[in-house]
């Protein structure tokens, strides 16, 4: 049942995102590629290297160290797009990064996993992610519902204006249900391993966000794009990490970091949303 309801919930979130996204938002990224380049470099290269360094600093056991690198190498989570909307960020940038990192995942994730096993466990491990199912999942949970929402907003703007208010309310409930279900599903692992690997996963999230924020300031990126980078960096596709660890590798011990990170990433993301909305409560949405 969860295998049907969660993708359906993600699709609902993306329709809501599409209702508030315009084609011009994506065109604007073409003339300002720095944010896209920063997001891709950080997520595809920077996060796995950061995870490896923190695994060494925290002296994590080999399975947990490999799991932290696997988590870092996973693509951005689909929920990041909706949370970016909640944080009044650049949704077009968020969607672009989510789709791009997901398309790259069948190549990049196996490379980083193999490297992590060699470094921390002195093992030679090869893993292959199925390309077609990965692309199909991206299309059904991200691209198609986004296109539906954008098309409605473009063709029926009056209807979209009315619908988006209800869509936000429904999507917020759906998002909270997804997060609650994800945390509940991993609750036993959180209780068993939260104290042992929790500090490392929290450090990973906070350091990664600090790097993104500092770099965004140096590049003078506008606040909405920084908000999108924060959410797409912190919210990883935990489902991909769990699938690789448990299904493809047959190593539940490698999945521990991802299970613990479910609670960490959502808590930090929602704190950022609350802080942003409190700051902008008397300010109109900015244009990316």
Image (cartoon, rainbow, N blue to C red):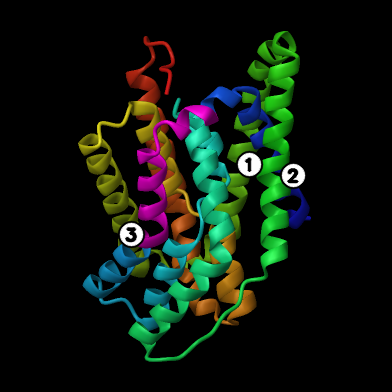
Label ID, residue 177: 1
Marks 2 and 1 sit apart, C-alpha to C-alpha, by 12 Å
Q: Quadrant of the N terminus?
A: bottom right
Q: Which residues are magenta?
A: 26-47
Residue 160 forms part of the magenta stretch: no
Secondary structure of residue under mark 2: helix
Type of secondary structure dominating the magenta stretch: helix
**Which residue occupies 60% across, 38% down?**
175
In this rendering, the label closer to the viewer, 2 or 1: 2
Residue 32 forms part of the magenta stretch: yes
Instruction: Say which quarter of the image contains residue 41.
Output: bottom left
164 to the left or right of 35: right
**Residue furthest out toward the front:** 31
Marks 2 and 3 sit apart, C-alpha to C-alpha, by 31 Å
**Which residue occupies 75% across, 14% down?**
156
Instruction: Say which quarter of the image contains residue 164.
Output: top right
Q: Earlier in the sequence, mark 2 or mark 1?
A: 2
Label ID, residue 8: 2
In this rendering, the label closer to the viewer, 2 or 3: 3
Give the residue number, with chain letter if any, for mark 3: 46
């Amino acid at each position: 049942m969860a295998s049907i309801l969660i993708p359906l919930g993600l699709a609902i979130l993306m329709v809501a995102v599409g209702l508030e996204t315009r084609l011009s938002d994506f065109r604007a990224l073409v003339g300002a590629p720095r944010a896209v380049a920063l997001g891709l470099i950080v997520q595809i290269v920077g996060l796995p290297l950061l995870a490896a360094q923190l695994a060494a600093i925290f002296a994590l056991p080999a399975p947990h160290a490999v799991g932290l690198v696997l988590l870092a190498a996973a693509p951005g989570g689909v929920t990041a797009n909706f949370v970016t909307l909640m944080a009044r960020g650049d949704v077009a940038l968020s969607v672009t990064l989510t789709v791009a990192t997901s398309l790259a995942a069948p190549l990049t994730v196996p490379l980083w996993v193999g490297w992590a096993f060699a470094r921390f466990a002195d093992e030679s491990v090869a893993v292959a992610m199925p390309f077609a199912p990965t692309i199909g999942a991206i299309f059904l949970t991200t691209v198609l519902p986004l296109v539906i929402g954008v098309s409605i907003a473009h063709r029926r703007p009056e209807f979209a204006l009315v619908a988006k208010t209800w869509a936000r309310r429904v999507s917020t409930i759906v998002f909270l249900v997804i997060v609650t279900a994800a945390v509940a599903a991993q609750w036993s692992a959180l209780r068993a391993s939260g104290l042992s690997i929790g500090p490392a996963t929290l450090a990973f999230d906070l350091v990664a966000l600090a790097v993104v924020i500092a770099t965004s300031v140096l590049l003078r990126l506008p606040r909405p794009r920084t908000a999108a980078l924060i959410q797409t960096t912190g919210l990883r596709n935990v489902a991909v990490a769990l699938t690789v660890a448990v299904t493809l590798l047959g190593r539940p011990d490698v999945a521990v970091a991802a299970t613990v990170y479910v609670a960490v990433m959502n808590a930090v993301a929602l704190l950022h949303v609350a802080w942003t909305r409190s700051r902008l409560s008397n300010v109109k949405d900015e244009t990316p």
